[in-house]
Amino acid sequence: MDHEAEVWRQFHADMLDPDASRRIANNKTIPADWPADLGYFMAYRFAQAFYDQAQDKQAALQTLFYVDDPQAILEKSGNAKKFQ
């Protein structure tokens, strides 16, 4: 994605806000030049990076299917480090 670093910065700024309207199901409430459903895309990227770095792919899938700590998945994925 050409603007993934920019998308990450905006997502990171918004991700802990309990109001998810800037991240999910927002195609009618965001500026025309900004991607809708950013939360879904970023979750996909975190899950992809988490799975790719995992030694035990089966355990990684179990972790992703039964998420109890999304922040830990983000950290373990290493995806955020690409943009720091």
Image: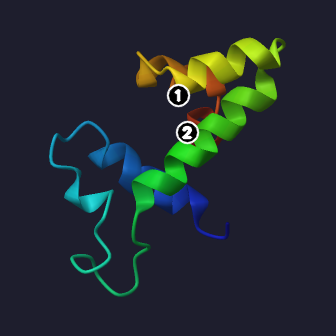
* Residue 23 percent coordinates (x, y): 32, 57
Q: Which residue is mark 1?
A: 74
**Looking at this view, is 46 or 80 the one in front?**
46
The quadrant the C terminus occupies is top right
Q: Residue at the location (43% across, 25% down)? A: 70
* Residue 80 percent coordinates (x, y): 56, 36
State whether residue 12 is above or below residue 67: below
- Of the residues tagged 2 and 1, which is closer to the observer? 1
Answer with left or right where residue 18 lies relative to residue 57. Answer: left
**Looking at this view, is 24 or 13 the one in front?**
24
* Residue 47 percent coordinates (x, y): 62, 36
Check the image and name the residue furthest to the left.
Answer: 19
**Looking at this view, is 16 or 84 the one in front?**
16
Marks 2 and 1, how far apart at CA: 14 Å
Upstream in sequence: badge 2 or badge 1: 1
Tag shown at residue 23: none
Density class for disc 2 (Cα within 10 Å; few <14, some 14-19, many ≥20) is: few
* Secondary structure at numbered mark 2: loop
Answer with left or right where residue 30 lies relative to residue 52. Answer: left
Q: Residue at the location (29% across, 82% down)? A: 31
Corner quadrant of residue 46: top right
Q: Which residue is mark 2?
A: 84
Corner quadrant of residue 30: bottom left
Density class for disc 1 (Cα within 10 Å; few <14, some 14-19, many ≥20) is: some
Residue type highlighted by circle 1: Leu
The quadrant the N terminus occupies is bottom right
* Secondary structure at numbered mark 1: helix
State whether residue 7 is above or below residue 17: below
State whether residue 46 is above or below residue 42: above
Q: Residue at the location (21% across, 59% down)? A: 21
Residue type highlighted by circle 2: Gln
